[in-house]
């Protein structure tokens, strides 16, 4: 039955959505404003209804709670599948907050997932995690060994330093050894004499106590989205924004059969025929399959062809493609303000800046006074900022003799003139040398 529902929902996600009205992009702005306000007090490990239309199916034996209006919440581990859609001239949006582990430690941290437009998500069928999970710490000055069995002669699985944190799940028969996770996929036995922690709730471990990886719900899921369905130039396509804290170790995910390790923010789209696209807006993502992998940095994306396994789950059909710079202007319409951590859209500067000439000459050499305005940076380069303000974030640097053609100019916050190279891309005029007819570049109000 679940596979039939999945197939039915996937058939509704066509490559281009229809029926958007002329309020574009006001409808999307309204939807994201609804997420930000209605979900402002969102509880951890929950799905918050942000803007109609959102649908979900709960797992059997899960208590039903109302989930039909902005602000309604349901536990994230209670859901078999959920979707958002743009039916009835709406732009559905929902946000999930959940705890996620990195690949090599038990330091869980909040991750945000924002689904909007036409999206369907299918987490794997749940498995029972060991219970209780109790925090213990290695206290032995020399560290400790985690072993395959409760015996000093058993194979050493992992060597742990003093103060290493573990999650205890059980005891051996005489209570002298503790079964514990050292990271979400490494579990073994450690001598009780080498740890500290309250373990009175632990029961005797059974043979299958350690058969389940300790990943959180939503660290793994399949998904589909519409693609290329933005109803106007200033609106966003349907998709998913997935975000972890870029200043912490990368969180690990299994998305459509891919191993993704993320510290930052990615925009995700997927269709079986079109494949999966992973756009890294902020930070860095490592995307891998057993045969190969790529590291994608801010401002770039990769694509992976997809297929269907016999059980209806998604699998990769080929290895990830080499990263390419994404369309910066297209990414600016994404609703990043509704995420959990502050972020911005990253820029590969060479999508708007020309590299220095290979012969070392100035790019302005030989330009006529009537040529299209071109600017270049001097010996020490020039900072590119997100707004015409010397206190705005530096998003890139124009190197010596690199060049660009400004599209506008404006008076900045410092009462000086700034060049606009693209939306939210500015450089101060006195940091550049000009060539051509730069007086023809339109003077505008700061619309960044």
Image (cartoon, rainbow, N blue to C red):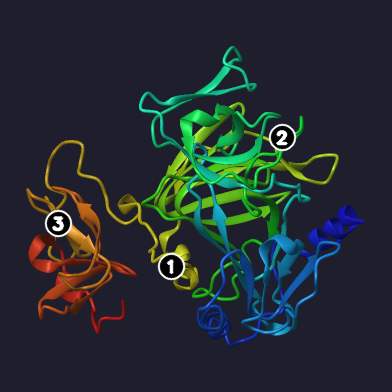
**Residue occupied by mark 2:** 205
Q: CA distance from mark 2 to mark 3?
A: 63 Å
Q: Quadrant of the C terminus?
A: bottom left
**Residue found at the very far right of the displayed protein:** 1
Q: Secondary structure at mark 3?
A: strand
Q: Residue at image x 50%, y 41%? A: 136
Q: Earlier in the sequence, mark 1 or mark 3?
A: 1
Tell me where residue 45 sits by quadrant. bottom right
358 versus 33 height, above or below:
above
Q: Earlier in the sequence, mark 2 or mark 3?
A: 2
| Residue 112 rendering spot, x and y as whole percentages | 53, 62
Q: Which residue is mark 1?
A: 332
Q: Nearer the viewer, residue 105 or 112?
A: 105
Q: Nearer the viewer, mark 2 or mark 1?
A: 2
Among the two numbered marks 2 and 1 on one chain, the one whose residue lies closer to the N terminus: 2
Which label number is shown at residue 191? Answer: none
For this orientation, the residue located farthest to the front is: 174
Residue placed under numbered mark 3 in the picture = 382
């Amino acid at each position: 039955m679940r596979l039939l529902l999945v197939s039915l929902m996937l058939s509704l996600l066509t490559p281009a959505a229809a029926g958007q009205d002329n309020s574009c992009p006001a409808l999307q702005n309204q939807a994201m404003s609804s997420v930000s306000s209605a979900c402002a007090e969102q509880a951890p490990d929950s799905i918050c209804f942000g803007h109609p239309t959102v649908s979900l199916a709960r797992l059997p034996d899960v208590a039903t709670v109302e989930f039909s209006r902005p602000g309604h919440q349901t536990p994230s581990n209670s859901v078999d599948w959920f979707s958002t859609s743009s039916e009835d001239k709406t732009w559905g949006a929902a946000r999930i907050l959940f705890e996620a582990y990195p690949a090599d430690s038990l330091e869980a941290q909040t991750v945000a997932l924002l689904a909007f437009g036409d999206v369907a998500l299918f987490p794997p069928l749940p498995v029972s995690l060991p219970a209780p999970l109790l925090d213990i710490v290695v206290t032995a000055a020399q560290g400790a060994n985690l072993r395959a069995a409760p015996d000093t002669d058993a194979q050493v699985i992992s060597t742990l330093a003093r103060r290493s944190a573990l999650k205890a799940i059980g005891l051996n028969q005489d209570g002298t050894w503790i079964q514990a996770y050292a990271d979400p996929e490494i579990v073994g036995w450690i001598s009780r004499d080498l740890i500290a922690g309250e373990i009175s709730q632990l029961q005797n471990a059974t043979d299958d106590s350690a058969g389940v990886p300790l990943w959180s719900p939503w660290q793994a899921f399949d998904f589909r989205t519409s693609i290329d369905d933005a109803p106007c130039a200033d609106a966003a396509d349907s998709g998913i924004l997935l975000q972890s804290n870029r200043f912490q170790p990368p969180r690990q995910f299994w998305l459509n059969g891919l191993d993704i390790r993320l510290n930052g923010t990615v925009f995700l789209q997927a269709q079986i025929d079109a494949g999966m696209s992973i756009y890294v807006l902020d930070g860095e993502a490592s995307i891998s399959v057993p045969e190969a992998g790529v590291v994608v940095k801010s401002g770039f994306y990769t694509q992976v062809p997809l297929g269907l396994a016999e059980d209806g789950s998604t699998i990769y059909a080929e290895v990830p493609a080499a990263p390419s710079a994404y369309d910066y202007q297209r990414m600016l319409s994404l609703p990043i303000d509704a995420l959990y951590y502050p972020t911005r859209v990253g820029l590969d500067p060479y999508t708007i800046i020309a590299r220095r000439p290979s012969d070392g000459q100035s790019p302005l050499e030989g330009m006529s006074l009537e040529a299209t305005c071109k600017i270049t940076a001097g010996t020490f380069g020039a900072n590119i900022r997100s707004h015409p303000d010397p206190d705005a974030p530096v998003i890139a640097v124009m190197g010596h003799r690199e060049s660009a053609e400004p599209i506008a100019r404006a008076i900045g916050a410092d009462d000086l003139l700034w060049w606009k190279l693209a939306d939210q891309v500015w450089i101060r005029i006195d940091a550049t040398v000009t060539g051509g007819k730069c007086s023809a570049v339109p003077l505008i109000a700061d619309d960044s």
